[in-house]
Amino acid sequence: MQMDDRKIKILETVIRNYLETGEPVGSRTISKYTDLNLSSATIRNEMADLEEMGYITQPHTSAGRIPSDLGYRFYVDNMMKEKTKEVEELKVDLLEKQDRMDQILKQAARVLADQTNYTSLISAPAVHRNKLKFIQLSRVDAGQILAVIVIDGNVIRNRILQVDADMDDETLLKLNLLLNTHLNGLSIGEINLGMIAAMKEKAGVHSQIVSDVIDAVADAIKQDEDLEIYTSGTNNIFRYPELADGKNASEIITALEEKQELTELVQSTLQSENNTGIQVYIGNESPLSTMKDCSVVTATYELGDGMRGTIGVVGPKRMDYEKVVSTLQTLKKEMDKLYRKE
Amino acid sequence: MQMDDRKIKILETVIRNYLETGEPVGSRTISKYTDLNLSSATIRNEMADLEEMGYITQPHTSAGRIPSDLGYRFYVDNMMKEKTKEVEELKVDLLEKQDRMDQILKQAARVLADQTNYTSLISAPAVHRNKLKFIQLSRVDAGQILAVIVIDGNVIRNRILQVDADMDDETLLKLNLLLNTHLNGLSIGEINLGMIAAMKEKAGVHSQIVSDVIDAVADAIKQDEDLEIYTSGTNNIFRYPELADGKNASEIITALEEKQELTELVQSTLQSENNTGIQVYIGNESPLSTMKDCSVVTATYELGDGMRGTIGVVGPKRMDYEKVVSTLQTLKKEMDKLYRKE
DNA sequence: ATTAGCACTCCATTCGATTGAGTGCTAACA
DNA sequence: TGTTAGCACTCAATCGAATGGAGTGCTAAT
């Protein structure tokens, strides 16, 4: 069977109508809604065809039709019109707290959830193959040394180290010099055992501190690799009855809370980047089985130098794809811009 | 009417039974469960009395009785036995990541939720009237200065400052000296305008940096004052049918997500400390109207020097108070211990 | 003071009847 | 050959009556 213009128009009407109302749509409704001037009987025939082709289904005999996953897919790929207005204010909001990465991310997630009325998630960018920019040891108290580690992209980690013997400023200065001359500008992979041994030797009695700092560096990186994910608007799930009832809601919320599962989603998005940078997972297309009754739309943002994170929306299959995609696009652009400026 | 031993025993049976099953309990059940050897008829008379006194209610005529808020209150105040075993492992878990405050808090919340099967929340300790311990400026890049601010209790804040002209190490050293000699050991309230003016004067051309640092300090403190709250086990709500249905669940989850409301709860707990440090809010006793169908149990932990935070549990009114209270007590102790050691 | 017995209440469940939206099919029509 | 009117049929949803059962309150007897 072949898709023709009329079938497409009918399919589109079914989908748009269902997106609005959430109710199965029948032949009579379509006959009235479209400018095709066809009787409901004709529409019925066409709908039977569309069902056979897999684009729509009936929840039960004698109900109207609703889009299948394939139908949504067709819609997203071929029928969506771009919206490109809106989401002006968030620019300002985002810029407000530039200096705190996590604040920005939380803010972005919140904006996204507010704008769309779905649940949003955002992953902090993975630092990965980035370079050490700066290390600083300071004495904050008797027996306590503060290590500050800065990675490219101004990601900052702190660590308090305990030392047995108190340290004078001069020693500390020397250690700082030692660490920075050896490690600065190196990526994580470039720091090897030989280097560490050499540094320890030069540090003499203070070799312990060197080990501790190296550990701290390794730890800081690792912490960044099990990427953090923030969510917002979890409660929006309750707006959509098909997701709100007991078991379903519980599963989804659990998944959103146990960020564990979400990392899979994030990874999947990061890997398979398509030309637009926007991914749409409909129902079972999602890498998460928990989300089989949802649609997930994600975008990848870049903070320059290969630091990439994911931002996305989780909602019912009958989500307003146009709005979600356009909002994501705007947000993605803002995020990209944000750091290009710095 | 007076409370006597028999009434107490019956009330207790009603409550314990209801805690277990979640179903209203009838007179026959009680007649069998207790060692009172009374017929159901007698029990019925007593239960009518208890109802009149306000300790129990009927969901409808011809149903069994369930405890009222007052009944739970009586139970919590007079009938609870202390449990003091369990929760051994968490000690280890907690100590593992000592150096990252937020990690500890998240971990604690998670342990609490896992142990109890309710939803848990924890607020980061407010730093408030604490003293500045250490300030350090470092040059990390052309035009970028990293400011590290350490507050008593080893709370660390970072800030990247942009500067127009590049700075040499010597100037930086001077600035560091200037800032530390003036500000170290001062509480936030003690830093006044006169001081700032004096410092700016000494800094000469670099007075802008001084302002920026002061701003950063103020900001770091402020950030700490709108206290952060972490939650865990939100999904546990779905274990309890009386909370799981649509509207209720939605409200509670929203409240847990919009941490805004929770701060009220935290404040209320922090202020009204009783001798044990544990607060039990039953139904409407809670300062949050959203929680009127829940019980909330909170504890205050101290990290020495007046830094106090709140840790708590949100669950159905028929929660296992004994377990929750004992778990909270253990956890509170662990948290207290944790920092006394440092 | 306690208890057996009984009438009564009210929720929960089941069952059937009804309703209505929507379909599929057939036959007529242009 | 494509379109349409008409009709029988299906099935979820809704309503109401009937039924069962858990539990109470009250009364009279012990």
Image (tube, coloured by chain):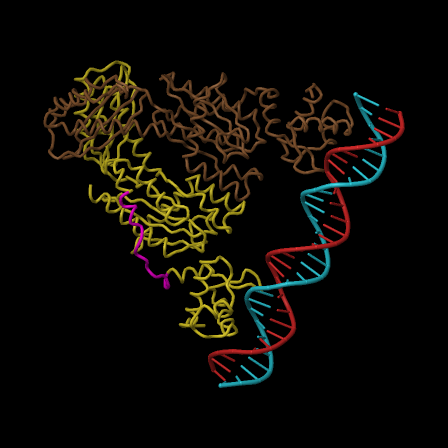
Chain colours: A yellow, B brown, C cyan, D red
Residue B164 locus on image (x, y percent): 12, 35
Nearest the camera: B218 or B132? Answer: B218
Nearest the camera: B7 or B158? Answer: B7
Residue B189 locus on image (x, y percent): 28, 20
Magenta stretch?
Answer: A77-92
Residue B95 in the image: above or below residue A76: above
How many numbered marks appear? Answer: 0
Residue A202 in view (yes/no)? no
Q: What secondary structure is the stretch in magenta mostly built from?
A: loop
Residue placed at 48% from the left, 46% from the top?
A: A238
Residue A105 in the image: above or below residue B324: below
Does residue A84 show up magenta in the picture?
yes
Classify the position of the N terminus of chain A by image quarter.
bottom left
Picture quadrant where residue A150 is located: top left
Question: Is residue B335 shown left or right of residue B158?
Answer: right
Residue A234 locus on image (x, y percent): 43, 43
Does residue B233 show up magenta in the picture?
no
Residue B30 locus on image (x, y percent): 72, 28
Residue placed at 28% from the left, 42% from the top?
A: A94
Residue placed at 44% from the left, 46% from the top?
A: A236
Residue placed at 26% from the left, 32% from the top?
A: A156
Classify the position of the C terminus of chain A by image quarter.
top left
Question: Is residue B78 shown left or right of residue A43?
Answer: right
Residue A179 in the image: above or below residue A29: above
Nearest the camera: A174 or B122? Answer: B122
Nearest the camera: A214 or B303? Answer: B303
Residue B248 in view (yes/no)? yes
Residue B181 in the image: above or below residue B257: above
Question: Is residue B140 shown left or right of residue A259?
Answer: left
